[in-house]
Amino acid sequence: MIVNATQNGWEVIYHRAHALLAAQLAGQWRRKDSPPRMYETLAAISHHDDLEQEWKEDNLTEAGAPRDFTMNTETIVKKLADLVNNARYRGRWVALLISKHLSRLNEPKRGESPELNQFLDEQLQNQQRWREALGLQPAEVDAAYAFMQWCDRLSLILCQKKLPADQRFLEISKGHDGQRYDIMQRSDNLITVQPWPFEDDKFTVNIEACNLEQVKFESCTELNQALQQAPIKVLEWTFVKS
């Protein structure tokens, strides 16, 4: 989960909600140069974090605060494998993109365990098999994944409140077209991206977050109960073409 400190406690955004925000942003892209298999790509983006089940896991720091996902260091291979296997039921294209996502995140950890090494090898084999079965060139898959990664990155910038102050630009990443894109929040709180990659000149996206007014928790059970009962607030961002 994504955890932001507030004046009275914590703002918690579930990873599945972050993924849905990424899909909202993807759906705003210019129609004329969207990546291939756009609807399937949207499905992959919206489900790429389904392995996170915060309500079932130990998500407390030693100090008793909700633990942000950036503090997680343990790699559970079975969870990774289950995500890819479950994605397969949505189709090979969805599974292919999610497999590439897990490869990118976990290849730097190669060597941590024989199980992880085997998982990573299997993903490379899966990706080649699915790509060939779908009749795709490597460049086509790489471009679609770059699009997925771009949307994921933009969603995280918003969810983690990373927008710079004083109308300064921040690089998002390169898109599937090879173009670098930068984001900026204007003095009126509207957001713009340069160059403008979206279909409409103005649109709004949103996400739901839990508002916790308790700073410390004695157990994961207590945290999960608080999350279930916490007020829900809707965070919105309006994008405009400058």
Image (cartoon, rainbow, N blue to C red):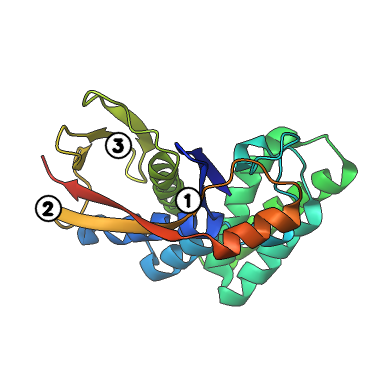
Q: CA distance from mark 3 to mark 2?
A: 19 Å
Which circle's residue, 3 or 2, is located before the other in the chain? 3
Q: Helix or strand or loop: what does disc 3 sit on?
A: loop
Do the residues under discs 2 and 1 have CB atoms within 8 angstroms?
no
Q: In the depicted view, which residue is nearer to us: 173 or 6?
A: 6
Q: In which quadrant of the rendered view does residue 128 lie? A: bottom right
Which circle's residue, 2 or 1, is located before the other in the chain? 1
Residue type of the residue flagged with mark 2 = Asp
Q: In the depicted view, which residue is nearer to us: 68 or 44?
A: 68
Q: Residue at the location (82% across, 34% down)? A: 111
List the residue tagged with mark 3.
Answer: 179
Residue type of the residue flagged with mark 3 = Gln
Q: Counting other residues with Cα less than 10 Å from the Cα at mark 3, is it few (<14), some (14-19), or many (20 or more)?
A: few
Q: Helix or strand or loop: what does disc 2 sit on?
A: loop
Which circle's residue, 1 or 3, is located before the other in the chain? 1
Q: Residue at the location (22% across, 50% down)? A: 238
Q: Is any part of residue 140 visible from this angle?
A: yes
Residue 106 percent coordinates (x, y) = 68, 41
List the residue tagged with mark 2.
Answer: 201
* Numbered circle sitting on residue 145: 1
Q: Is residue 102 left or right of residue 189?
A: right
Q: In which quadrant of the rendered view does residue 185 lie? A: top left
Q: Nearer the viewer, mark 3 or mark 2?
A: 2
Q: Is residue 191 above or below residue 77?
A: above
